[in-house]
Image (spheres, grey):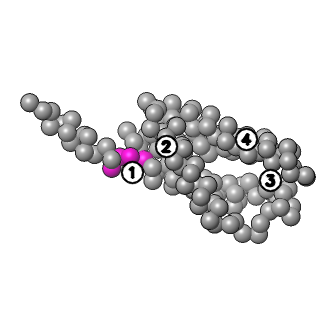
């Protein structure tokens, strides 16, 4: 005899994964657009002539697509709880944003050192919150 409840639960799993992926993406985009467009704008102004007047959308789309896949794979899906996903996401955000910031600071003349800890902290917060929301939706 099969358990009808287990079968129904298994059939909803792919839908929950899609919903969790969308929730993670929407959270990440909403937070990041708010940060980049409003709150964090003064920090990025320190980039001076390195900063584009408008974001290059193909590069942004490539980043968000790849980063979303990694957040789902390393933080959301393997975590047992939303708190665990947030911790895993925060650690992932630390590594990713620190790699970006420290590499730029090392090789780009005039990279603003004051931006480094701010952007790393943002990566921890953004990725942690987004992963926690995704895991909560995943159930």
Which residue is at a point 73% across and 40% down the rendered structure image?
98
Which residue is at a point 37% across and 38% down the rendered structure image?
139
Query: Helix, strand or loop at disc 4?
Result: helix
Residue furthest to the right = 110
- Which of the marked residues, 4 or 1, is nearer the chain's N terminus? 1
Residue hosting label 3: 43
Q: Position of residue 128 (x, y in %)?
A: 58, 39
- Which of the marked residues, 2 or 1, is nearer the chain's N terminus? 1
- Which of the marked residues, 3 or 1, is nearer the chain's N terminus? 1
User: Which label sits in the foreground, 3 or 4?
Assistant: 4
Q: Is residue 37 left or right of residue 1?
A: right
Q: Position of residue 21 (x, y in %)?
A: 45, 49
Real-space Cα separation, disc 2 to disc 1, in angstroms: 11 Å
Which residue is at a point 74% across and 54% down the rendered structure image?
40
Judged by its main secondary structure, the magenta piece is: helix
Q: Position of residue 35 (x, y in %)?
A: 68, 54
Residue hosting label 2: 72
Real-space Cα separation, disc 4 to disc 2, in angstroms: 20 Å
User: In terms of depth relative to the viewer, which is nearer, 105 or 126?
Assistant: 105
User: Which label sits in the foreground, 3 or 1?
Assistant: 1
Q: Is residue 42 left or right of residue 1?
A: right
Q: Position of residue 136 (x, y in %)?
A: 43, 40
Circles 4 and 2: CB atoms closer than 8 Å: no
Magenta stretch in the rendered image: 15-20
Residue hosting label 1: 18
């Amino acid at each position: 005899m099969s358990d009808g409840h287990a079968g129904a639960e298994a059939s909803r799993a792919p839908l929950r994964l899609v919903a969790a992926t969308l929730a993670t993406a929407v959270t990440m985009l909403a937070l990041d657009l708010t940060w980049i467009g409003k709150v964090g704008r003064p920090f990025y102004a320190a980039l001076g002539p390195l900063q584009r007047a408008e974001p290059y959308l193909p590069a942004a789309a490539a980043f968000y697509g790849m980063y979303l896949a990694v957040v789902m794979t390393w933080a959301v899906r393997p975590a047992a709880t939303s708190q665990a996903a947030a911790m895993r996401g925060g650690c992932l955000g630390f590594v990713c944003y620190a790699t970006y910031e420290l590499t730029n600071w090392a090789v780009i003349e005039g990279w603003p050192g004051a931006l480094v800890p701010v952007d790393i902290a943002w990566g921890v917060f953004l990725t942690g919150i987004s992963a926690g929301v995704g895991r909560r939706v995943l159930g």
